Amino acid sequence: MPLKAVLFDFNGVIINDEAIHQELLAELLISENLRPVPGEYRSICLGKSDRVCLQELLERRGRIPNQVYLNQLMQLKTHSYQKRLAAMEKLPIYAGLEDLIYKLRLEKFPLGIVSGAMRVEIDLVLERSNLAQYFSIIVAGDEIKTSKPNPEGYLLGAAKLAEMFPELALQPEECLAIEDTTLGMQAAKRAGMQVVGVANTYPYHFVQRHCNWAVDYLWDLELERVQEVYAKSSSAVIK
């Protein structure tokens, strides 16, 4: 079972923007006459789609949002996110990302993104950082019905790559996922994938307990060792 493709999470793996999302959600709650709670974002939202995060924050405050109301709030947040990034001279792309992409391109691996972020936000970041050309497919939060740890996004990502590269006869277990949250790692594992956990959001020792390979920085990933494990047998997959 060779390694054939790599799927990246977005927030917390490609761009260091969790603090921005936290601030924008707090501003959104205040605009709705609701009070943000310190630490709530980290405990509720990390690893979940933007929509599910916002819905849970509202429900905790006694509001059961319908889809029209939720869509309006999501559009406001996305607009604020775009304005925030437009004001930045340089986007906070994680160190080591371009080095890893270079290694993966040398091996001719198709690359994709599986994220709970809105598609317009992902596109904006990839275009601004000149990374769009490297990702063949994107599965965004406004395309799937569920949030991580549900494997739907990763299964769809593998299916999209399989359709785009039929010569690979790609199966989900032949994909490698790169994640920073436990919910994301669980989603990839439930899709049958092995997972690299990068210690961008949680400490290394914590990440290490939830993935197949843990790294402090993306440039630390020893791609040759990963390929060797895939080549030996499918029994290395952690479920």
Image: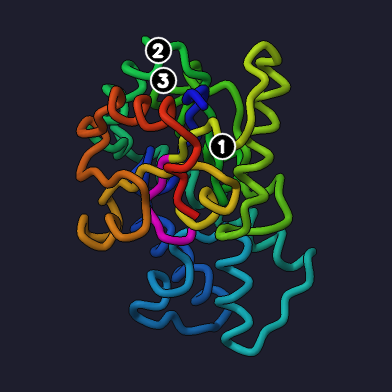
Query: Which of the marked residues, 1 or 3, is nearer the chain's N terminus?
Result: 3
Near-viewer residue (137 or 194): 194
Of labels 1 and 3, the one closer to you:
1
Near-viewer residue (95 or 212): 212
Q: Is residue 87 above or below residue 226?
A: below
Residue type for callout 3: Asn
Secondary structure under tag 3 reads: loop
**Residue annotated with mark 2:** 107
Of labels 2 and 3, the one closer to you:
2
Secondary structure under tag 2 reads: loop
Q: Position of residue 55 (x, y in %)?
A: 63, 71
Residue type for callout 2: Glu
Of labels 1 and 2, the one closer to you:
1
**Residue annotated with mark 3:** 130
**Residue annotated with mark 1:** 173
- Classify mark 2: residues with Cα within 10 Å, few (<14), some (14-19) or many (20+): few
What is the magenta range?
A: 178-183
Query: What residue lies at 66% left-to-right and 15% top-to-bottom?
Result: 165
Q: Position of residue 42 (x, y in %)?
A: 38, 70
